[in-house]
Amino acid sequence: MTGSRPPRPKSPSAPGLLPLLVLFALLLLGACARSEPAAEPAAGEGGPAYGDTLVEASIGDISGLIPNITSDSASHEIGNLIYANLVRTDKELRLEGELAERWEISRDELTITFHLRKGVKWHDGVEVTAEDVDFTYRYMIDPRTPTAYAESFRQIRRAEVVDRYTYRVTYEKPYAPGLLSWGIWILPRHILEAPWKAGVDLRTTPQNRHPVGSGPYRFREWKTGEKVVLEANPDYFEGRPYIKRVVYRIIPDQSTIFLELKARNIDMAGLSPIQYRRQTDYPAFRKGFNRYRYLANAYAYLGFNLLDPRFQDKRVRQAMASAINKPEIIEGVLLGLGRPAVGPYKPGTWWYKENVKTYPFDPERAKALLAEAGWKDTDGDGLLDKDGQPFRFTIRTNQGNLVRQQTAEIVQRRLRAVGIDVQIHVVEWAAFINTFIRKKNFEAIILGWGLGMDPDQYDIWHSSKTGPDELNHISYKNPKVDALLEAGRRTFDEAKRKAIYGELQDVLAEEQPVVFLYVPDALPVVSARVWGVEPAPAGISYNFTKWYVPANLQRYTR
Amino acid sequence: MLTYLIRRLLISIPLLLGILCLSFLMLKLAPGEPGVIQQDLQARATGAQRETLRQLYGLDKPIYVQFGRWLWRVIRLDFGRSYSPDGRAALDKIAERIPITLGLNVLELLIIFSVAVPLGILSATRQYSAFDKSMTLFVFVGFATPDFWLALLMMILFGVQLGWLPMSGLRSLNFEYLDFWAQVWDILSHLLLPVLVASFGGLAYLSRLMRGSLLEVVRQDYIRTARAKGLPEGDVIYKHAVRNAVIPVVTLLGMMLPGLLGGSVFIETVFAIPGMGQLFVQSAFSRDEPVLMALIVIGASLSLLGNILADVSYGLVDPRIRVSGREAR
């Protein structure tokens, strides 16, 4: 996950939210973008020029080139360059059309009509039409399709091809995240429909290894475990991308990626906090690369199993929030590269609410709250107890994420200080999910969520989503929250949604179903010979096709 | 000889079955399910969807039924399709990696033997000389150096600081535009660091073995006889002593043969070489059972075969060892 190229902001977050319970390495998509000017900008002449190759590294091989049915970030990033979508988010994270020129929402907010651009061609020359959109829709809702993004398309009651360039979908109920879900990669009907109808698993079709898309880059080759090469699509409808070739090298080792970066054999990567602070802050590196820093689109939290009666008392959870020193975690673990999280949204988005209730570090208040909830140290052993039981629980987190493990250690120490004994258990990912999360066999966890481009978080907080394979694994149930989550989906009106999600943030801040810990910074670096990188709330790669290398700085001439 | 061979081959069938049975069981007893069903948490796969997938892959059947079905397919050399999202045939995935790992390992063995044997001989013939002492030092350093550390140091020196050698991968990005000899050099230069790092430990070990073995042999009576005959020292060492001293080294080579297809996970990961080791680890992490089991079957069969071959050839090389009773009579 880490070290790979940041995803473009148009990641199709199923209904707005793509919860990746993964290592935080979503590098782009950030508000409050701060960039450091290169110490010495490379002298470029002649303005934008076509040509050159941009080399990036991915820690894992991609799993396939039909991104609709993959779940790894590398496949999605490459898919984003090969395929186009109906809609995407712009640099300010607002929706804009890509294949869709414009769209209309009916007055009852049930129907969306998309008007497609005319004359857009697949890489093999066939025109992109509403039939392709319709095929993508039918493929997504097919129960045989192994996709994680079907849910929002299942909300559609009727889908119709009005004419060659017009597509209309009608939802069961108004469904605001639905619009963003059309950021799904549109697939070529003329290639895939026949095998799909014949019942062939599309992963075994050539499209999955030699895809034909309609996006800014054409597929050129994929050498398993070695590299994927893309070439600029001269007929891209928004203009031919300047950078002629993009190479994803597959390098399965983090330190090798970093060494290759230092040797300038890789042009773009994401740094870890320690690399950013200690290992790249020297003149030669600063001369070769521009470093960027902005909030990542993710947050980490300490979650409790709310089926456990001890955690059902809101005061206990509030006490934990007061007992934990978030700035200390950010200083110690993230080396200052992040900020405290106060709710499940990223600061800077239009739905983010400032001034919700916060819990500054205050052990005394934590102790008072715990005492109020009946937790007192009656036997003088330094541990709080209630009904003769000491307050003792285990925090579990996944292996391979040092930041989370270190966070757990700091939390452990702070909770011990208020009289709670915490054990830490680091578990391999598969066992973590199967043995603990799905069976709800845990007391507390430290995990993170990656966030989508829509405030809808129905799957995470709604009480109907607490099944073993669903995302509300902390079993949070609150009728008020349920009502707000439902209301937020039912209107497209931004002002109304802002109010609804604002209220949701107030409730969650008061309730602390989880202790929101921090929002980490994304720390991408891009070779200094690349010009045209403009950090924005969406991160940096939203305008990737407009990046260029001035003619006199081009390195790969063939 | 022939009956011995046939007997060994027959014995290895139940042995192989036992290995397969154990590996299959271990795979099934490990916590978690194949990654395809797990799909992390981001998948919105519902319980019903997972159940469909389990049925599709036959994972809902009792374990002995699964084993039986799998074995029946393996006998017909059908290892099935990978569970990973690419859904490719397990054998294809393995086949494309075999030449890479094989090439790397053969190079490594060649270097180890062609360097270690002369080093060992020189050390033995100049026992306690400055050369021998420095070799002893080198050997201890070789034993003690963790290869991950050595790999990083070499990469920093030759890749980052000096910029002489490529650090990872098999080919440069402009490979297809190079002429033939430039392509050969390109691949060789990419292999240089990994092969060097991978051979370092073996080099130290084998040169020590060679030295010890030769020192042992030169104390034998027939060497004294050869010297008493007045043979030149060169003939004594290279014609009489080395021939005998090299036998344990050859035995070791035999034992290394089955390992030729097993890639070093570490080397392949650090140097980004898409070989067998990487495939094994990836399949293990994602519980990609078809690929994993295919790798185990291939690995186990080759090891058994390698053992038989080593035993047989050892008998051929060393006249003191004969396999069947006839010669002994």
Image (cartoon, coloured by chain):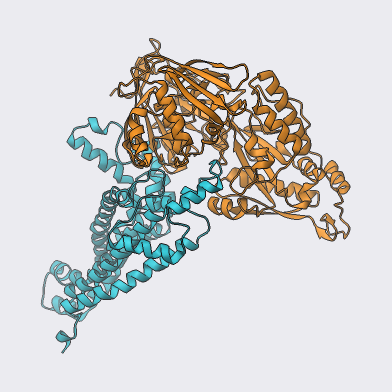
Chain colours: A orange, B cyan
Of A202 and A228, nearer the camera is A202
Question: Residue A59's quadrant in the figure?
Answer: top left
**Vertical placement of residue A544 versus A303, above or below:** above
Task: Please tell me which residue is depicted at 63% across the width and 46% down the height of the picture.
Answer: A406
**Vertical placement of residue B202 versus A157, above or below:** below
Total numbered labels placed on residues in the image:
0
Of A289 and B200, nearer the camera is A289
Task: Please tell me which residue is depicted at 40% across the width and 35% down the height of the picture.
Answer: A66
- The residue at the far top in this view is A46
Residue B230 in view: yes
Of A511 and A186, nearer the camera is A186
The C terminus of chain A - image quarter: top left
**Vertical placement of residue B296 versus B152, above or below:** below
Task: Please tell me which residue is depicted at 41% across the width and 52% down the height of the picture.
Answer: B283
Question: Residue A510's quadrant in the figure?
Answer: top right
Q: Position of residue A267 (x, y in %)?
A: 42, 28
Residue B168 in view: no
Q: Position of residue B144 (x, y in %)?
A: 43, 58
Could you tell whether A511 is left or right of A245 in the image? Answer: right
Q: Position of residue A45 (x, y in %)?
A: 39, 11
Could you tell whether A267 is left or right of B39 in the image? Answer: left
Could you tell whether A478 is left or right of A138 in the image? Answer: right
Question: Residue A144's quadrant in the figure?
Answer: top left
Q: Position of residue A270 (x, y in %)?
A: 50, 33
Of B268 and A399, nearer the camera is A399
- The residue at the far bottom in this view is B329
